[in-house]
Image (cartoon, grey):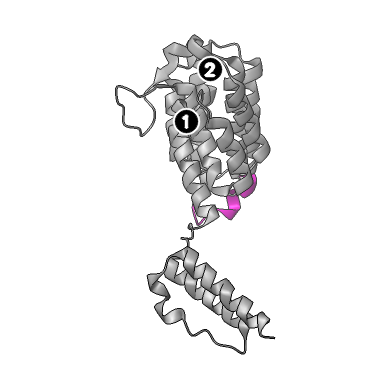
Amino acid sequence: MVSCLLEVCLKALTPTATNHWFLMDFVRDTCQFVGQIHDYFFVSCVSAGPSRYRAVARVSAALSSFAASTEFPEFAEAYWSKLLRYRLETGPDIAWEGIESDLAADLRASKLNPRNRADLLAVVQVLHAEEWAEEGSSLRVQPFNRVITPQSTLTYSWQDLCEAYVTLFVPSLDQETLCHINGLFDTEAKRPFYQSLLEIMGSRLQNLQGPVQEAPTTTARRILAQEAVNKVIEPRVLDWMDDDGNIDDTDFIRRCLSEVDDRFEKE
């Protein structure tokens, strides 16, 4: 009941362009109240696991939409971070079945752009260290947006949820942080479960590193060498370079060095 009321309130209070500034104080108070309800769900609530988790999912989705239209996205980001850490601390739990997939879809559809790296690294470290193995086999699901083949590895729904969460951070991460996180997931044990995330991080790293510069062609290298030799042997001028296209690199280098030797022997 509490989660239903919160969902209605969040949707009803979403400000429009005309009443945006009039509702800001109330919006902030509402977000803080939702945070208190979050603590209630995970600390004091005595409802059965599935009911409690469905309530969490309902409020999470509503808060994401609400925060995207206000100036307080940090409330939704903090909420999701607490949710992820709680989920990972509880370990394999069949009560989350079906709920995690919905949460992952809500995260991917959200417009959140979280930047709190402390929250991100806390989740990433737990994902790197977890060893739930086959204890969570009942939670395996088809990976999001991935073609399934007989050789494919199905992932866990909680891993799909965590992957959706980490993916939100990728556009704002620097090269060093991306390399660190990529190294934690790009291992034999983790790689099959986080293929989409690794591809996204790899694309981001390529953009940060810039285009790969092609090595100069043989002709370009020889032109550079000619210019260098000309500077060394001034005021003399090279007179043998017009026919150097018919010789290999070894002979070309030998002739360059010979010109330099001749220049200083005649001093």
Which of the two discs, 1 and 2, sits closer to the camera? 1
Amino acid on which disc 1 is placed:
Tyr
Q: Is residue 124 above or below residue 256?
A: above
Residue 217, image quadrant: bottom left
Q: In the rendered image, which quarter is residue 267 located in?
A: bottom right
Position of residue 83 measured from the top left corner of the image (x, y, whole percent):
58, 26
The residue at which mark 2 appears reads as 52
Point out the stretch of residues depicted in magenta.
16-27
At horizontal 51% and vertical 26% (from top left) the residue drawn is 190
Q: Nearer the viewer, residue 224 or 144?
A: 224
- Say what amino acid the circle numbered 2 marks: Arg
Q: Is residue 234 visible?
A: yes
Q: Secondary structure at mark 1?
A: loop
Instruction: From this view, report whether residue 231 is shown above or below residue 1.
Output: below
The residue lying toward the viewer, choosing from 149 and 135, is 149
User: Quick check: can you spot residue 4?
Assistant: no
Mark 2 closeness class: few <14, some 14–19, many ≥20 residues within 10 Å? some
Tell me what residue is drawn at x 51 percent, y 19 percent.
53
**Above/below status of 262 relative to 89:** below
Q: Front-most of 267 and 159?
A: 267
Judged left or right of residue 46, residue 193 is left
Residue at 43%, 71% (x, y): give it. Answer: 219
Q: In front here: 38 or 195?
A: 195
Q: CA distance from mark 1 to mark 2?
A: 28 Å
Residue 158 percent across, percent down from the top left:
49, 23
Residue sticking out furthest to the bottom: 235
Residue 194, which numbered label?
A: 1
Where does the image place residue 26, in percent across and percent down from the top left? 62, 43
What kind of element bears circle 2?
helix
Magenta run includes residue 51: no
Q: Earlier in the sequence, mark 1 or mark 2?
A: 2
